[in-house]
Image (cartoon, helix red, strand yellow):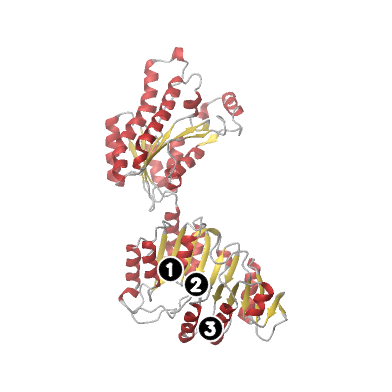
Amino acid sequence: MSVLVNKNSKVIVQGFTGSEGTFHSSQMIEYGTNIIGGVTPGKGGQSHLDKPVFNTVEDAVKSTGANTSIIFVPAGFAADAIIESADSGIKVIVCITEGIPISDMTKVYNYLENKDCTLIGPNCPGIITPDEAKVGIMPGFVFKKGRVGLVSKSGTLTYEAADQIVKEGFGISTAIGIGGDPIIGTTVEDAVKLFFEDDETDCIVMIGEIGGQLENNAAKWVKKSDNKKPVIGFIAGETAPKGRTMGHAGAIVGGKDDTAEAKKSIMRDCGIHVVDSPADIGKFVKKYMSLLDNKNILITGGSRGIGKSIVEVLVKNGANVGFTFTSSDLAANNICKELNSKDAKCIAYKSDASKFDQCEKLVNRFLDDFETIDVLINNAGITKDNLLMRMSEEDFDKVIEVNLKSVFNMTKACQRVFLKNRRGSIINMSSVVGVKGNAGQSNYAASKSGIIGFSKSVAQELGSRNIRCNVIAPGFIKTEMTDNLSESIIEGWTENIPLKRPGESIDVANLCLFLASDLSSYITGQVINVDGGLLT
């Protein structure tokens, strides 16, 4: 799904053979837009840019089935061109023309009220759905396909915002430049509604300016909407003097709600994430498009191996993370130093999860630092492998204490926070050994299978409070611990794995990311193997 235009749009150009129409039509055709002809009165029957020319829009529609038009005609004739398109059955009309008299646009606005069409502009850069259709004058190379919807009064800021969004690793679903004249066809609110209804748009960037009430109206509509897509807003004209037109004809401060400060205040009150500098638009998109969006996550055993990978992935996806360690202060502090940023916080705590009193203290310290807990990941664990006949009672008890009792301790300590919030996610790290057993690891297998039974019980017990509990069961995963194994042992494991290779710690971390995010909100009580098909 796309918004208004896509690869199947049949586009005609009004003012096709003029200098502006010729130049921009060439650019649109080169981009891949489905330009099927154009209109220039008196030149019907000719060919231009290898496309047919028609005398009227009606002739073009009858001949080609056109459903979209873009207008490059002088200001004095632009209103008639818009009305002609609407009368001929065009569904999407993009008017690039600048300087159309307000009296003309008033007539157009009233005329289109009973027409089944959408007008974008006038005095706008047009609309683009990246890699499908560019119906406008924007530089196509700036836009890459993605899931961020962009609506803007300013052409220049449209391009700037798109460039920032792409450089942050995201892309644009559709960008709509609505224009900055006092009377326009598609308003900010209209565009935001389209993006909210679009399945391929996950986040919306709304760029406005001083003057008028379009941004305020859109913000108030967003507040009333049940849709939870994040909306990021910027208002240009912070330093504009009152009563003076700045750039666009509509960019003039009149009433008290027309100022940039007032608009930003209204937008914030309506739940929109307001950017004070246009240079930060891309950063805000990254922040609010991240899967974890400032979730506060507590993880045990996060200073090395799988735990370290989990911490890194969570922070890079927008989470604030606190993790425990028991030995190397230097390693833990280095992780925090590397990952801490303006957008996410990472704190290391020296704590032993096998001791309940330490768990309670840990939770209180975490709450002091982060205010709440959204996700608990129980990852801490040890091995003390030996054949049953040689295994000491001390080794058995120690593995049970660290691997299993710590899960009980941390879950119990965090439960009060989850119950108060009436939400939470618990992710417990087991192992395929807990599912199938393994010779020489009876203590480890007992602890990991215990985690599975414990987690399924917790999922049933706390599910009615919107608290989820799931288990990850890694298979043979390459870590510092496996680096010391002989090649024969590694080959023995991989021979039985359908994918014929060991897993990486990032494979487990990515599953943690999914289970910690709202994408998994209907998943609880499950054991998910990360084993390359070993237990298939």
Name the mark on residue 155.
Answer: 2
User: Which image quadrant for residue 450?
Assistant: top left
| Residue drawn at the location 45% of the way across and 64% of the way down | 193
Name the residue nearer the viewer: 157 or 429: 429
- Mark closer to the observer (1, 2): 1
Name the mark on residue 240.
Answer: none
For the residue labelled by badge 1, is the local secondary structure a helix, a strand or a loop?
helix
Callout 1 amino acid: Glu
Callout 2 amino acid: Gly
Name the mark on residue 189.
Answer: 1
Local crowd size for mark 3, using a 10 Å CA cut-off: few (<14), some (14–19), many (≥20)? many
Local crowd size for mark 2, using a 10 Å CA cut-off: few (<14), some (14–19), many (≥20)? many
Describe residue 40's horizontal placement relative to residue 349 as left or right. Answer: right
Residue annotated with mark 3 = 79
Mark pair 2, 3: CA separation:
21 Å
Q: Residue furthest top?
A: 389
For the residue labelled by badge 3, is the local secondary structure a helix, a strand or a loop?
helix
Where's residue 465, x and y in %? 34, 41
